[in-house]
Image: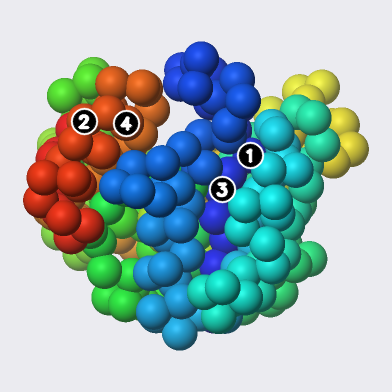
Amino acid sequence: MKALIFAAGLGERMRPLTETTPKPLLQAGGKPLIVWHLEKLAALGIRDVVINTSWLAEQFPRTLGDGAHWGLRIAYSYEGGTPLETGGGMLHALPLLGAEPFLLVNGDIWTDFDFATLPLSPPGLAHLVMVDSPGYATQGDFALDENGLVRSEGARMLTYSGIGIYRPELLAGWRGTIDPTAEAQQTPPRFKLAPLLRAAMKDGSISGEHHRGAWTDVGTPERLRQLDASLAMHGENTSSRQ
């Protein structure tokens, strides 16, 4: 199995920190956020990792190299000066990922979730890891039903953690699902992944699970400071829940 790390965002809410450093390369607990993921992926036995880049893209190979330090082979999917959003970024990276299911993780989160528990071959088009909605979020993203399927709506809304197993087939026929905006028609296309997930949910093609452990969306300088302080206090296996 290969892995894709989303790292192309502009990190606008993290300014001024991200004016000179891409968000996934900001440090918490003595190492860049993205390195926590690389270490876990290597421990899982994954060898091929694709990292999508845009903002300050040159800093990723400069910092991470080719991945040999972790026993990995890193390939970079450069999207140009403007990130292609989650859907466009995934589509752009598919030639590097191949035809098999792959593990996806957002480069700007920290979690104690065990990647080894993810299904290597999801029953549908994707398997998403969900978490309780953090206090700063007014509403969740999706719901889990009693059969472990992810739905667009439900009695208890959860937040998508930025971790999942995806089949490339999720992107098949994406043009028929995405609104034909100017950005979606550009080359390469720029569009979000959520509409494709919601469309697949209608057919029961998205499974999921609820992670109740530590998870932080490192979206602001304050959350980064809180995470760093927590890791310093408790060690690398725990984090304060944001």
- Residue 26 locus on image (x, y percent): 46, 37
> On the image, which quarter does residue 206 sit in?
bottom left
Q: Give the residue pinned by disc 1.
A: 8
Residue type of the residue flagged with mark 3 = Phe
Circle 3/circle 4 CB separation < 8 Å? no
Sequence-first disc among 4 and 1:
1
Q: How far apart are marks 4 and 2 (CA)?
A: 5 Å
Is residue 154 visible in the rendered image? The answer is no
* Residue situated in front as seen by the camera: 99 or 221: 221
Residue type of the residue flagged with mark 1 = Ala
Q: Distance between the residues labelled 3 and 1?
A: 6 Å
Locate the C terminus and report the quarter of the image it occupies: top left
Circle 2/circle 1 CB separation < 8 Å? no
Specify the label residue 6 is tagged with. 3
* Residue situated in front as seen by the camera: 3 or 238: 238
Relative horizontal placement of residue 158, taking residue 189 as reference (left or right): left
Sequence-first disc among 3 and 2:
3
Sequence-first disc among 2 and 1:
1
Circle 4/circle 2 CB separation < 8 Å? yes
> On the image, which quarter does residue 20 sit in?
top right
Circle 3/circle 1 CB separation < 8 Å? yes
- Residue 159 locus on image (x, y percent): 28, 39
Specify the label residue 226 is tagged with. 2
> On the image, which quarter does residue 56 sit in?
top right
Q: How far apart are marks 4 and 1 (CA)?
A: 18 Å
